[in-house]
Amino acid sequence: MTLARFCRKKPLGAVGGLVMLLILVTAIFAEVLATHDPIMTEAAGTLGRPSWEHWLGSDHLGRDIYSRIVHGARVSLIVGVASTLLGSVLGGIVGLLSGYVGGKTDLIVQRVLDILQGLPLLVLALVISAVLSPSIQNVVIAISVPIIPRAARVIRSSVLSIREMQYVEAARALGVAHLRIAFRHILPNTMGPFIVLGTAQLGSAILVEATLSFLGLGVPEPYPSWGRMLSVSAAEYAQKAPHLVLFPGLAISLAVFGSNLLGDALRDTLDPRLRGA
Amino acid sequence: MKTYLVQRLAIAVLTLFGMSVVIFALLRLAPGDIVDILFSTAGFVDPAARTEIMRELGLDKPIWIQYLDWLRQIFSGDLGKSYRYDLPAWEIIRPLLPVTVELAALSMIVAVVLGVPTGVISAVRQDTPLDYVLRVLSLAGLSMPSFWLGMVIILGLVAWLGWIPPVTYVSPGENFQLHAAQFLLPALAVGYRSSALIMRITRSSLLEVLREDYVRTAWAKGQTGRAVIWRHALKNAMLPVITVIGIEFAFLIGGLVVTEQVFNLPGLARFLVQAILWRDYPIVQNLVMLIAIVVILSNLAVDLLYGVLDPRVRYAG
């Protein structure tokens, strides 16, 4: 399906794609787009209303909110994409092997995934990030672990149907090694569900990062993070300076909204079977 | 039905057992043991006091004995001791429990009341502007962090009504109206998010059922649209919705973690976050296990309900 056709058939998906593109560009060119140093404090201009100098106002330490949001896009996107990739790839491999091998192995793997999935995503991420020391890598790990069972489920179910196809049987008859069949013959055909899964998980990964940072367990200082911009200090000054709360939250919502819109449209296009899942 | 029941129960018990291992192992991964963390604020550590605490916590025993001890503790209903408060955990948790249960129940009601009807409308009016608006609204609900939505609700109330929600907990006996307002606002923030998933699944499930032959038969018999949808189609469409409501319950607990924080409600979820921030690991371990039990039980309840509602499940199981 060409890009033009996708835009015509799925206008909402195209909007989502555009939003994600916008955030990606913001993340890449953060230095160019920012008007101030995002971590520079300014004692004279604390809690400033939006103005010519500070487009979206300044926070309780006089830092420019617009510049912090622009730089925050980079942190959110890096953490979101990295944890989604890590979780989906690990989960994908587990799902691929478990689905391909089948039998008792599959049964046991499924039960183990049940266990990992039994805790609410946020609670699991919360505990992992609390146990690990605060750093960007550890936040990525904490967010990716709950993604593993979800990714494994999706890939496994598509492997189960691909496994029975004739070309796989043919490969087996030719004496191709099992691992080669799994990775070279079956894996490429799970790309559709994989992309759908990744886009859908990206939104929730960004959301979890924001929540962890909001609670003080996510991305540490000095990196500007959308979630931490909303944390306790913002809540304290919210009455006096509502822009402290409004703009970072809008940024989070926009990013998650964009990836949800795109994910929905991709799901309908690439994998109609997953509709409503 | 009986084998189905036994099977489900066995799986639930097995999963819970596995979860206890995961949770136990996870909290042992923490850098430095609990004693180090307990002493980290003290500065000077008396070695005698250290061994004393190690012994009291049972940390001097082999790890698998520690695990078995913990299991025994949970089975006897002993939730351990909070080091922060120096009180039995159960005494701290007990007053928090009703707050969280009330909030969770209210949020769930909000989610279902918002989600199911909008899903039905969206399915019946598929591809109309109304359908688009409802879908975008529900997707927006999925995209907004519920803690942020909560903050915005508070800001809006202050800006437009000049009313600030109470900062401390108000019991229903004290002032019922204030209590209701205090709980309804966070329930709206959490419930809106959950309603989005319920709306989406109701919509897609109803769309599927509406294409079935028996629905066409109902139309052909000349039944009114309302009867076809509410009496014939929705009954079958509700099965996946019930599953999602069950799953959503687990997500909801995640949503409560931050919402209780924002609204300053003294609930279990807020206490969990505080215990995590204070590194009160014995409490964290027990609270997370408690959450796991609630989640598994609600999944089990959904499974059983499914068996009751859909006879096909019973025979297949």
Image: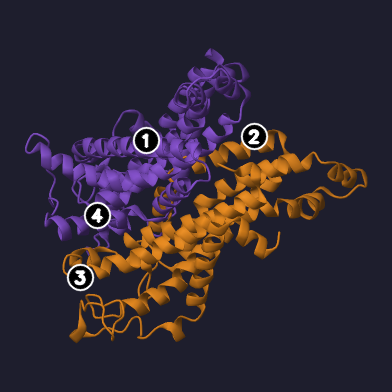
Q: Chain of mark 3?
A: A
User: Which residue is labeled 4 in the image?
Assistant: B153
- Please give the name of the residue rendered at 43% of the width and 54% of the height, measured from the top-left corner: A128
Mark 2 to mark 3 CA distance (whole Å): 55 Å
- Placement of the N terminus of chain A among the 4 image quadrants: bottom right
Give whichever of discs 2 and 3 has the lower sequence position.
2
Q: Tag 4: Cα neighbours inside 10 Å, few (<14), some, or many (≥20)?
A: some
Q: Which chain is represented by purple in the image? A: B
In screen coordinates, is A13 left or right of B108?
right
- Please give the name of the residue rendered at 30% of the width and 48% of the height, measured from the top-left corner: B189
Checking the image for residue A107, the label placed there is 2
The three-letter amino acid code for the residue at tag 3 is Ala
Q: Of B32 and A139, which appears nearest the observer?
A: A139
Q: Of A263 and B213, which appears nearest the observer?
A: B213
Whether labels 3 and 4 share one chain = no
The answer to whether marks 2 and 1 mark residues whose Cβ atoms lie closer than 8 Å is no
- Placement of the C terminus of chain A among the 4 image quadrants: top right
- In the picture as drawn, the residue positioned furthest to the top comes out as B2
